[in-house]
Image (cartoon, coloured by chain):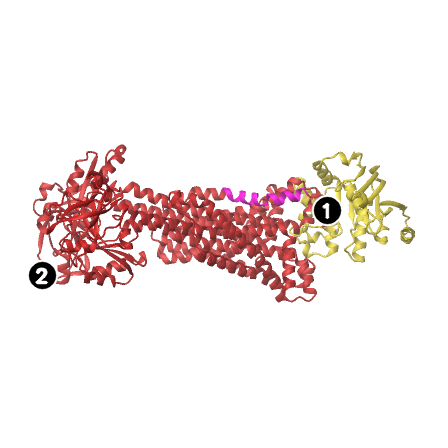
Amino acid sequence: MEILNVKNITKVYGQEQNKTFALNNINLTVQKGEFISIMGTSGSGKSTLLNVISGLDVPSSGEVYIKGKQLSSLSDKELTNFRRHHIGFIFQFFNLIPVLSTLENVTLPAILAGKNPEIVEKKAQDLLKLVGIGHLSHSKPSEMSGGQQQRVSIARALLNEPEFILADEPTGSLDSKTSKEILCILKNFCEHMNHTLIMVTHDAHVASYAHRVLFMHDGKIVDELSLSTCEHDRQKNIFDIISRIEGLKQ
Amino acid sequence: MKVLFKIALNSLAVRKNRTIFAIIGISMGIVLLVSSQILITSVEESHSDSIREQYGDYDLVVGYQNSNQFLSTQDIEQIKNINHIMDTSPFLYPYLSKEVEMQLSDYPSYVGFKDEKLAYEYPLIKIAEGNFPKEKEVLIPASFAKSKQLEVGSYIEWPFPPNRTQKIKISGILDTDQRLNHVAVFQYNWLQGITNNNNNTTALLIKLDSPTNKDDVVKAIKEKFPDTFIDKRKELDKERENIGGLKPIIQGLSIAVFIASGLIVISTLQMSIQEKQHELATLRLVAIDRKQIFLLILIEGCIIGVFSLLLGLMAGIISSMLLLELVGHLMGLAATDVTLSLPWINIILGITAAFLILIISSCVPAYQATKLSPLVAYHQSTSVHQAPTKKRAIISSILSLSTISLFLANYLYFEEKILYVMIALLLFCSLFISIPLIFIISTSFYNCLPKQLYSPEWMLASRNTLRQMRRNSQIASILIVGIHVLIIGNIILNSLKEGEETFLKEQYPFDLSIISLNPTEENGFSPKLFSQLQQIKELENIYFTNLVLLSTLNLPIHASGGNPELLVNEEKQAMLGIQGISFPIINEQGTVKVVDGTINEEDLGQNGVILNEKTSKQLGYQIGDEIEIGQFDDVISGKKYEAKTFILKGIIKDEKLDYTLLTTADIMSQQFGINSLYKIQININNPEKSSEIKANINKLLNDSAYSTTILYDQKQELDKIEKQSKQRLLILSVTVFLIIIMAGIGLMNNTASSIRERISELAMLRALGSSKGQLMRILLLEGSFITSLVGIISTLTATLIGCMFILALGSPVTSIPIKLIISLIVASPLLGLLSVFTPALWITRQNITQMLTK
């Protein structure tokens, strides 16, 4: 089932002579349950694409359809509501509220949506156990490691059972071992709970966890790769494409 | 140093808006300081000019009120040598009280003055036309000139007994003032000679170096010349007191303004340090040392201080010019009477003191900045929750609880006044120390609420308040100062006002009181005035003759009252006064209640007296008892005295006439030679005709025979007290209003800074699904949470402290400003809402994506 349809999206910054195309006529469709990685170097437009998909940013032209709904037709209130119920965010720097405990951070989106705190708390506890930090539900973010904080961030993103999860460099601040753990959790959620996951990364190894990798360069999707089951092949294929793109850059 | 200065300037310029608001906040305090100094000085000087115009600029009149006694030249020299006497000017009434005898009734009263500066201050020397008289010249009243068709330069022949008539030239005509209708002014020396009064002076005008030395001078004069009459010019002191009394209030309020300004500086600089931790860390990493960091922050404080002072000074002067007329009107001065006066010394001293306080305040955040570890600052990893240390929490808890306990113990058992003051100060200090603890307890209290009452906005708002604990504590401190000054000031001023009103009503219980300017034991005024007043139908009058001080000689042994130091034949006696009173005896409520015996004039006979119930019980005298007395001075000095016996004929219920024997005027005259009155108390039975009646009474009092009396109008005096009280409350309210505005500006700055620090966090909330409204509510709640909490607690503690100060003054706590307290509690959250509204609105309008990347 098609869950996301991006049609001719362009995002331009600056005026006439100083125009910059952050996104340049992007077209994309995503099926439910897919795990998509968007790769590219700094300034390629991958984070901008993520922001446009989520409705955080408005494209200069083109349309985004999520489950058939046109995002540009929604008011700010409707967009906010939409994000609350249909999208989960995972950020590179976790973006947890430092004054709230782990449990409170996880339940925050649901509390903001006006849901029953008791019901939500139970669900949050279960999610924390699922990501392996059930014992840290009353700790503050400053008392936890980066990996633990990112697990909180994941639990928060999943609490409202969103249609899809957007992750912007989720392992950017983590070491390799922790990154692997996080990626396994994300992949499990994708495959077993049928969440759609769109992840932005510049790391080929991280990208290799996805079903499909989109390569961006200068605001365009320049290539696409559906990945085989063999890990070695995946990474090799990714590196090949990157080299080709780097060659283009030169 | 130059580099540090440049960095500091740039740092402030980058955060332009915040810097501007901080400067505005501090300069408001300076405006208040400067304008209050200018306005009070201007009003005081204008008021002094007005007093001088009305009353003359001299402090005492010393002399005699008849033409049998005079001050000699040697007497005058002795008086001049008394400490604190700056200037004197003599005058002579050669025929005082002898006009009829000398057949001068058809002429104005002759008075001689010297042509000198002090003489011109006397109200009689107001020349409308012409010049001060020389020898054989005279200043005549305008009415006399008109009636006799005389003008300047005319000649008249007037008698100067015992010498012959003299041809004198009219040198000038006096002002058309009612007071000047009955006097003719001559050159002093010439009048002395022509009336055979060489070396004689009726009285001396005296100007002191300061009115505050009046009592000392009067005492010194009385010691040398006990028989002289001294006019202390109490009405002048009262007028001066009205404005002079405001000065201590303004000085006191200035201290509150200094404190508030200092707190704003600390708060602003701490915000600045918080925001540029990374910058400071970079500076430390590139080898700038702690001392230079200290100087950097101090320079920032100085820059803010200098701009604030300059702005405050200019705005203070301009606002004084604009407000001068209004303030003058509020103080009861006409617009034309008020002129601007700039007390440069006071202004400069005030500004200097303010600058020093700003510098000292800057040292606090500067010192804190030096404590930042470069790496900690570089990683922006400050403590999430600036919780007070355990030690501080324990100290503040103990302090708060012990002050409350001490207060209860003192109130219930000890009742020591000084202890009330100490407890009040302790409570005030403990409140400041306990601010963080109060915030924590309040948020913890919220956490105990059932989950159903949870609101995410409250949860986030309360936690963020704790996160900004240090800065919020400073804002809270400013608010605490303001609220305490307002409530305590109100309680004290209202209590003082009530005390003054009560005292006034005790002193002058009737609508009007005519009282002799002399003490009660000295010569008063003629009883003729009472007869004249009796002819005015709508009045109810009672008189009191002058009083004689007595000592009992036969006080019953069992008497609980009396004076243990007053011993006659080694037996304790009592000091009493005896006074004649008019009959029927009345008080302000009407006829006096008779407890026992009789109070009819006829029944008192030749030696009947009346006591009040309290005195008769204390002294043990009952109806029919003989009260043996002697004149107090004679008894106490051991001189030979004549014992007199009176019979107690009546006992009345009256709270005011303690230790006073009341009798008839005839008995006073026969037994003590007292033929004058000390006081007449008047009730007006027809309030509608009150103005007309008062005018009639004033007309009677214009007679020179009653020149030593003063009329007290109870309503007028109460109105004066009310007006004074309102003036003081207005000044208090304006000052506090400015302090609260400063707190509001501080809170706005604080919120703006806090928003900048957590902009990505707030963006994340929006990304997670928080609406703009929710974000706005979170921020508004943060602001109003601080102000509400501080408002409620401060209001309660301020009320308690105010009551303690009243108890320390020995007064009962009768007036608590309930309306003010409720208004403050209601207004407190509104202040928070208003202060944070603009920064909250700003953040909700920002682009989420841009905020996320910041």
Q: What stretch is highlighted in magenta?
A: B826-845
Residue B135 seen from this side: yes
Identify the element where label 2 is drawn: loop
List the residue tagged with mark 2: B640
The type of residue carrying mark 2 is: Lys
Q: Name the residue under label 1.
A: B850
Query: Which x, y percent locates residue A176?
Result: 81, 57
Looking at marks 1 and 2 on the same chain, the residue that comes earlier in the sequence is marked by: 2
Residue B560 can be seen, yes or no: no
User: What amino acid type is highlighted by mark number 1?
Assistant: Gln
Query: Is B842 included in the stretch rendered in magenta?
Result: yes
Q: Marks 1 and 2, how far apart in space?
A: 105 Å
> Which residue is depicted at the point 82% across and 41% down?
A10
Residue B260's spot in the image, x, y percent? 51, 53
Q: Nearer the viewer, residue A99 or B669?
A: B669
Disc 1, SS: helix
Q: Is residue A80 above or below residue B286?
A: above
Return the x and y of residue B629 as percentages of the image width and height. 11, 54
Q: Position of residue A184 (x, y in %)?
A: 81, 51
C-beta proximity under 8 Å, tags 1 and 2: no
**Chain A tint in image:** yellow
Numbered disc 2: what chain? B
Chain that bears disc 1: B
Q: 10 Å neighbourhood of mark 1: few (<14), some, or many (≥20)?
A: few
Q: The red chain is which one?
A: B
